[in-house]
Image (spheres, rainbow, N blue to C red):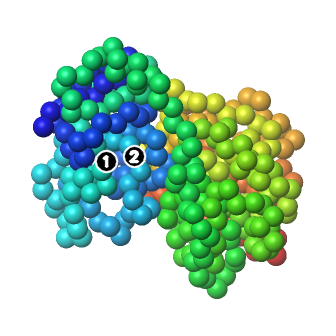
Amino acid sequence: MKAYLILEDGTVLKGTSIGSTREVISEIVFNTSMTGYLEVLTDPSYAGQAVVMTYPLIGNYGICYKDMESLKPWPDGYIVRELSRVASNFRSEDSIQNFLEKHDIPGICGIDTRALTKILREKGTMNGMITTNEKYNLEETIARIKEYHCKGVVKRVSCKEKRVLEGNGFKVALMDFGAKDNIAHSLQKRGCEVTIYPAFTLAEEILATKPDGIMLSNGPGDPKECVSIIQEIKKLYQSDIPIFAICLGHQLMALATGADTYKMKYGHRGGNHPVKDLETGRVYISSQNHGYVVDVENLDSTIAEPSFVNVNDGTNEGLHYLGKNIFTVQFHPEACPGPQDSNFLFDRFIKMMEVSK
């Protein structure tokens, strides 16, 4: 069946429908990872977005359910150059086509994803529609596409009830703003007992349990939309409990302490982004997924200082909070399937909890 990807600038790309055939309007973003397409599909940070995979062949190792980063896929749509006809992997349990159909996610293949990525890089992230309707009215469709805004996504992806992952070590409170499962697993592997809290949990409830450490997770959307969450993070900041924040959590902590964030032209999404540790000068290859970034130009130097920087464009990738047991990063040290260069940051968090005991 024919499918069409229509961008808000009037660009129309024709391809073949994959997954669900329903029509969807979303924000179109691209990911440069060469592997890990299932982790991308099940990353809650993609809620409210349709993902373009720049690697040309997707689905060649099938779907391995144990590799999922959450209980379901989150993107509104999926855009690929070619969908593999054969899944060659002894672990494979399903195909991407069936997976997308099962979860009612529409997609399109057979388009030039290089040309599409070039458009998004040159003009910036924009909204678009995936449709199988050949009789669309372009003018009316573009008007509808421009009206779309990604809102309320943290509430949609966060867990609804508190749950505990057993461990014999430090007690860590994990704030779930759209947490990838491997954050909790990375802590559990280090012996931690991890209590996962819904995004809108009050700080008083968390502090009353006297955790050894607090983690602020990744998540989707504009951090400035999370007004009530930022108010609770301010209270967590005032405590002396060690805090480690990733991605959206990093941005929310910055906003809670008076810093600012802004939307990037096309964001960082992929598994090949170099970040530089400003203390050691060492460069790590990182996994990233964000469209917003902390503005360090107006950072209060008495509160926090940059700890990591993106080698490609110089944007902020981490903050160290002065006089506090708090450090935050924009990238994903829990990256699964990888790269795992920065996995040591979980050990740093464990060390912080040991010292503050």
Q: Residue furthest bottom?
A: 168
Estimate how packed mark 2 is, as few (under 14), some (14 to 19) or many (20 or more) residues with alpha carbons within 10 Å: many
Vertical comparison of 282 with 158: above or below = above
**Rounded to the nearest whole Å, what is the CA distance between mark 2 and mark 1?**
8 Å
Query: Image height check: is 210 above or below 132?
Result: below
- Where 263 falls versus 217 (above or below)? above
Q: Quadrant of residue 209?
A: bottom right
Q: Which mark is residue 75?
A: 2
- Give the residue displayed 55% in from the left and 30% down from the top: 264
Kindly state the secondary structure of the residue where label 1 is placed. Answer: loop
Image check: 275 left or right of 147?
right
Residue type, numbered disc 2: Pro
Q: Position of residue 265 (x, y in %)?
A: 51, 26
Looking at the figure, which quarter contains the C terminus? bottom right
User: Does the rendering let one see residue 286?
Assistant: no
Dividing the picture into quarters, in which one does residue 26 lie?
top left
Residue 46's disc is none
181 or 304: which is nearer to us? 181
Q: Which residue is mark 1?
A: 105
Residue type (three-letter) at the residue carrying disc 1: Ile
Left or right: where 168 falls relative to 117: right
- Element at label 2: loop
Between residues 355 and 13, which one lies in front from this camera angle? 13
Using a 10 Å C-alpha cutoff, classify the residue at mark 1 as few (fewer than 14 neighbours), some (14 to 19) or many (20 or more).
many
Q: Position of residue 157 (x, y in %)?
A: 52, 54
Residue drawn at x 47%, y 24% is: 147
Can residue 293 be seen at all in this image of the molecule? yes
